[in-house]
Image (tube, grey):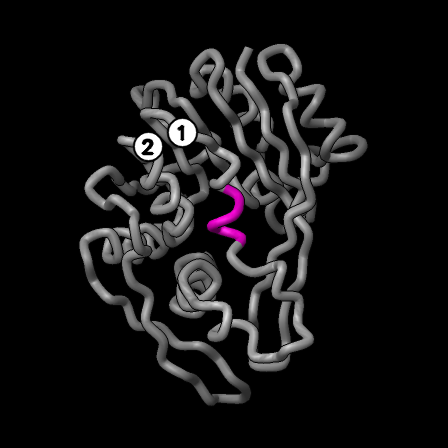
Amino acid sequence: MNPYETRKLVDEYLLFHYASAEEILTHAAGPASALDFAVRTPSYAGKGTRALDLGCAVGRSSFELSKFYDQVIGIDFSQAFIDAAEAIRTGTELNYERLEEAATYTTLTASLPLESRPENISFETGDAMNLRADLGSFDVVHAANLICRLPEPEKLLQRLPDLVNSGGTLVLATPCTWLEEYTPKENFPSGSTLDWLKTQLAPHFTLVEQHDEPFLIRETARKFQWTVSLLTKWERV
């Protein structure tokens, strides 16, 4: 079974996207700067009319983009993720389980983020490597922690010039954790991910900024994944 369709993963992503700092990190010495990743990455998108959030998961970045864009389309390969995002968009307070340890759980609730404009958002399932032809173009395309989870990432990179308006913005974030369970080794970058992105995108995009953006995924009350994503911001030439 696709793990991204399981209740376990949906609950973990709802926690990652919607939980408060206190609900995720209960240890004072923990890496608080790694919280709110799904809020931080769309903050690089600026303002505009149309936004595309690829690999939107359970939707938090799409809601953040809706504060500054009149139309936001969130796309994810997982139907379970899209169902959760759509439930929140329509005003449902979505309960989910946070694993503490062993078989002990705490029930938490994900709800619509403040100041978001859900009426400006539509969610749909889709394959980032084979997006529907009639999507049109956007002032910003945001794709966080997606590129190194695709079997053929170059297919998405080749489509991006058609998706971003001239002068528009592309925001990519990737932890560069290339794994053969997601991407065949022959489709890995031959060198660094950054150099590969520069080569692939250079004919159509100018690199404007690059940053390290840490993120934190809570597995249990005492076990966390701390990872640093490479965020790059590009302008369509």
Q: Quadrant of the N terminus?
A: bottom left
Residue type pointed to by label 1: Lys
Q: Does residue 9 show up magenta in the picture? A: no
- Report helix, strand or loop for mark 2: loop
Q: Is residue 46 above or below residue 12?
A: above
Q: Residue at x 44, y 37 (%)?
A: 54
Find disc 1 in the rendering and name its residue: 47
Q: Nearer the viewer, residue 210 or 101?
A: 210
Residue 190 position in % (x across, y down): 78, 31
Residue 138 position in % (x across, y down): 38, 22
Residue type pointed to by label 2: Tyr
Q: Residue at x 30, y 72 (%)?
A: 95
Q: Is residue 217 above or below residue 82?
A: below
Q: Badges 2 and 1: C-beta atoms under 8 Å apart?
A: yes
Q: Residue at x 38, y 45 (%)?
A: 64
Q: Quadrant of the C terminus?
A: top right
| Residue range of the region highlighted in magenta in the rendering | 37-41
Quarter-of-image position of residue 50: top left
In the rendered image, the residue lying farthest to the right is: 191
Disc on the earlier residue, 2 or 1: 1
Disc assigned to residue 26: none
Residue 236 position in % (x across, y down): 53, 16
Q: Is residue 30 above or below residue 207?
A: below
Q: Main secondary structure of the magenta part?
A: helix
Q: Residue at x 50, y 22 (%)?
A: 160
Q: CA distance from mark 2 to mark 1?
A: 6 Å
Find disc 2 in the rendering and name its residue: 69
